[in-house]
Image (cartoon, rainbow, N blue to C red):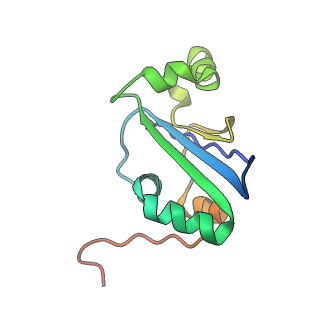
């Protein structure tokens, strides 16, 4: 199973607060929950809209161990989890630089609730 880490960071920056969610995965996953976060992670237009509507900046990061070990080594919390539990702790979700989940990622419903938005997955061929 991959490592997903979500991190929620609330701070004042101008007129906006900031929410930071980070997923740390062993490898990419073939799941709707992974695809939902991956899509949010890549969608800068969505993040700008989220900032205007929610008054909160959304920062997301998706780190995959098979791609690069550097982010795992640079985060002391993740490194400590890996040292004590080995890769079985993955995925890890960090929110605001704090360990939030270890061993799983957010479901679509949980991510939707955290962000206070509706999230749906559409596939080619779905009606």
Q: Measured from the top left, where is residue 96 in percent x and y?
A: 69, 41
Give the camera-side residue of 71 and 52: 52
Give the camera-side residue of 8 and 107: 8
- Farthest left residue? 125
Q: Measured from the top left, where is residue 78 in percent x and y?
A: 59, 25
- Farthest bottom residue? 127
In this picture, residue 55 sits left or right of residue 35: right
| Residue 98 position by quadrant | top right
Q: How many marks?
A: 0
Question: Looking at the figure, which quarter contains the N terminus?
Answer: top left
Q: Is residue 102 visible?
A: yes
Q: Is residue 86 visible?
A: no
Residue ID at (52%, 63%): 48
Question: Looking at the figure, which quarter contains the C terminus?
Answer: bottom left
Q: Measured from the top left, where is residue 125 in percent x and y?
A: 23, 77
| Residue 45 position by quadrant | bottom left
User: Considering only vertical position in the picture, is 71 above or below 21?
Assistant: above
User: Considering only vertical position in the picture, is 24 above or below 59?
Assistant: above
- Farthest top residue? 83
Give the camera-side residue of 45 and 92: 45
Q: Measured from the top left, where is residue 120 in percent x and y?
A: 46, 72
- Farthest front residue? 14
Residue ID at (58%, 14%): 83
Residue ID at (33%, 30%): 67
């Amino acid at each position: 199973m991959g490592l997903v880490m979500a991190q929620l960071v609330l701070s004042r920056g101008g007129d906006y607060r900031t929410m930071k969610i980070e997923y740390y995965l062993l490898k990419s996953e073939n799941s709707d929950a992974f695809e939902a976060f991956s899509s949010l992670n890549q969608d800068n237009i969505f993040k700008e809209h989220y900032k205007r509507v929610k008054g909160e900046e959304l920062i997301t990061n998706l780190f995959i161990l098979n791609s690069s070990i550097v982010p795992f080594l640079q985060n002391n919390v993740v490194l400590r989890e890996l040292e004590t539990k080995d890769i079985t702790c993955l995925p890890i979700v960090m929110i605001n630089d704090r360990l939030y989940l270890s061993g799983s990622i957010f479901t679509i419903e949980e991510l939707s609730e955290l962000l206070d938005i509706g999230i749906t997955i559409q596939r080619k061929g779905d009606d």
